[in-house]
């Protein structure tokens, strides 16, 4: 395995192809324009997002290994289709480049689009680096096919897609070895009378959703398993697959964040440590299903949450989830909620340091921090 | 050179700011360093300018954000130099490299460490192109990142398709020797 300097689009395209999907489809828009140009020969292009999702759904129902590439702003327009894929247990993988979604939107990165589809029943994994994407995508295929639950893998538009950096993409045989045992069970069977799309009675509907919720919660075990299996093959580790931590054991104040901002937060936390301030970090990789297990390591600490999306008329999803844990008997002191980086405004190490300082002071606050 | 070297590249759209960043990043890797180059504009900005960023470090680079205080600013279009934000955040002993036929004394920017090179001319002559980014990477290698020309050549071979590498290499070499 060799470290190479690769452009973001090249790295993403190479990773996608190494997973050997039989169906690749995409929507040619920034920030995935470069990636889809490189995948042109292997990819079917769509202009209507819901059309692409329906196509993927049909292909996966016939037993194909499918991946779709799209940007975050298009996700909300296929909300119903996404929910239908999930509740029918169809294993599709989507690679989504985060991009702001409300009109008039700059095409830069925020998680508004992801938050809009958070309860469609998909597994949502957020990568913090391009390297992590190269390691997460095969895991997404494996998790998805083993559990028949669809998986979205998120990267940050422009931060990852337009970056040139050193990446170590594992050789083809490692991908093949890892994905050798996956088999997608065709859901669509015309010979049987089991028609999935039939309308259901309220009882059947409730039962179906309850079963799906159970399946979604049990996916976490598979995610952890896939992470450790991949780690054994390539020797790179990203926490336990659900979340990763930095200096959490003796930390007094902890910032919980997602995505590419983790790199900046790491630098800020390292500086705080040099000053003798016991700061720690938790990066959520798995956003849905929410890893409630994280509460155990956050016990007796001051916790702040950074979210790159503004939930209109409500509070941030991660914040609410952690509050729920805190009320469920765990001694979790969730003090601060930071909403920042909306519309792609740039957040640097200084912003991360400000957040860590406020958490350390124990300020009970909900504020919006403006980026550059 | 400080532990992390940060470069900001200003250009008009289409002049090769992104390519310049990529080549500098790839060349630094051949010198045993980690690098990261990125841009936030996959499209034209309101004023038609484009900014690319490049970080070089001995250790793996963790941070992802725009560079506010660069160690070096590369200006691919002399017109962009007159914009107030172009030289923002540059502190001593930060360097400025400008693509212009003028000499450093004719530019009158008030910066001490300013270097000039006619990269557009080199690009026209050797690459039959108006995109000066690649040629400018040669100048940056000599003045800013202290990278040998061979590493720039290797980077060009990686980034560009085989047909155009010969001209690009010559343009970079020309700028490497002509920058002052």
Image (cartoon, coloured by chain):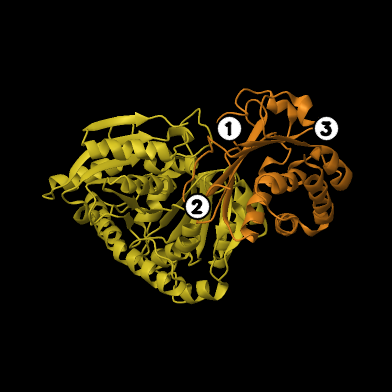
Task: Name the mark on residue B61.
Answer: 2
Q: Residues within 10 Å of mark 3 (few under 14, many from 20)?
A: some
Q: CA distance from mark 3 to mark 1?
A: 23 Å
Q: Residues within 10 Å of mark 2 (few under 14, many from 20)?
A: some
User: Does label 2 or label 3 sit earlier along the sequence?
Assistant: 2
Q: Secondary structure at mark 1?
A: loop
Rendered residue at 57%/46% (across/down): B5
Name the residue beneath numbered marker 3. Answer: B101
Name the residue beneath numbered marker 1. Answer: B90
Q: CA distance from mark 2 to mark 1?
A: 21 Å
Disc 3 chain ID: B
Rendered residue at 26%/52% (across/down): A205
Q: Secondary structure at mark 3?
A: loop
Q: Are marks 2 and 3 in contact (CB under 8 Å)?
A: no
Q: Which image quadrant is residue A356 in?
A: top left
Position of residue B76 in the picture relative to residue A349 (left or right): right
């Amino acid at each position: 395995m060799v470290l190479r300097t690769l452009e973001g689009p090249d790295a993403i395209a190479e990773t996608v192809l190494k997973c050997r999907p039989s169906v690749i489809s995409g929507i040619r828009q920034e920030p995935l324009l470069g990636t889809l140009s490189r995948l042109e020969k292997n990819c079917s292009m769509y202009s209507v997002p819901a059309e692409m999702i329906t196509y993927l759904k049909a292909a996966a129902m016939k037993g194909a290994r499918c991946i779709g590439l799209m940007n975050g702003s298009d996700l909300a327009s296929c909300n119903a289709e996404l929910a239908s894929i999930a509740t029918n247990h169809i294993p599709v993988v989507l690679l989504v480049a985060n991009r702001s979604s409300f009109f008039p939107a700059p095409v830069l990165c925020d998680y508004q689009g992801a938050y809009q589809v958070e309860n469609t029943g998909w597994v949502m994994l957020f990568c913090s680096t391009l390297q992590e994407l190269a390691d997460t995508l095969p895991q997404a295929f494996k998790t998805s096919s083993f559990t028949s639950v669809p998986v979205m893998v998120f990267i940050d538009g422009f931060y990852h897609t337009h970056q040139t950096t050193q990446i170590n993409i594992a050789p083809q045989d490692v991908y093949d070895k890892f994905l050798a045992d996956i088999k997608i069970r065709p859901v669509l069977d015309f010979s049987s009378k089991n028609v999935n799309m039939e309308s259901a009675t309220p009882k059947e509907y409730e039962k179906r959703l309850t079963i799906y919720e159970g399946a979604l919660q049990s996916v976490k075990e598979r995610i952890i398993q896939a992470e450790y299996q991949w780690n054994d093959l390539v020797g790179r580790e990203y926490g336990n697959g659900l979340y990763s931590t930095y200096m959490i054991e003796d930390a007094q104040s902890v910032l919980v964040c997602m995505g590419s901002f983790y790199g900046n937060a790491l630098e800020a936390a390292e500086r705080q440590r040099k000053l003798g301030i016991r700061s720690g970090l938790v990066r959520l990789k798995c956003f849905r299903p929410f890893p409630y297990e994280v509460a155990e390591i956050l016990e007796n600490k001051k916790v702040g949450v950074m979210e790159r999306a503004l939930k209109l008329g409500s509070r941030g999803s991660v914040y609410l989830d952690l509050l729920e844990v805190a009320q469920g008997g765990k001694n979790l002191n969730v003090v601060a909620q930071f909403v920042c980086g909306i519309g792609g405004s740039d957040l640097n190490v200084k912003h991360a340091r400000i957040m860590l300082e406020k958490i350390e002071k124990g300020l009970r606050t909900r504020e919006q921090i403006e980026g550059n | 050179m400080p532990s992390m070297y940060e470069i900001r590249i200003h250009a008009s759209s289409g002049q090769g700011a992104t390519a310049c960043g990529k080549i500098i990043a790839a060349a630094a890797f051949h010198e045993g360093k980690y690098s990261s180059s990125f841009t936030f504009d996959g499209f034209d900005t309101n004023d038609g300018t484009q900014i690319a960023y490049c970080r070089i470090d001995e250790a793996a680079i963790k941070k992802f954000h725009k560079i506010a205080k660069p160690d070096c600013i590369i200006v691919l279009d002399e017109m962009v130099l007159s914009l107030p934000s172009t030289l923002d955040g540059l502190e001593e002993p930060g360097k400025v490299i400008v693509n212009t036929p003028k000499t450093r004394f004719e530019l009158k920017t008030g910066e001490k460490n300013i270097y000039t090179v006619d990269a557009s001319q080199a690009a026209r002559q050797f690459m039959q192109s108006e995109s000066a980014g690649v040629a400018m990477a040669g100048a940056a290698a000599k003045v800013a990142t202290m990278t040998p020309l061979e590493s720039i050549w290797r980077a060009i071979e990686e980034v560009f398709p085989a047909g155009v590498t010969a001209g690009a290499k010559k343009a970079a070499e020309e700028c490497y020797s002509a920058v002052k």
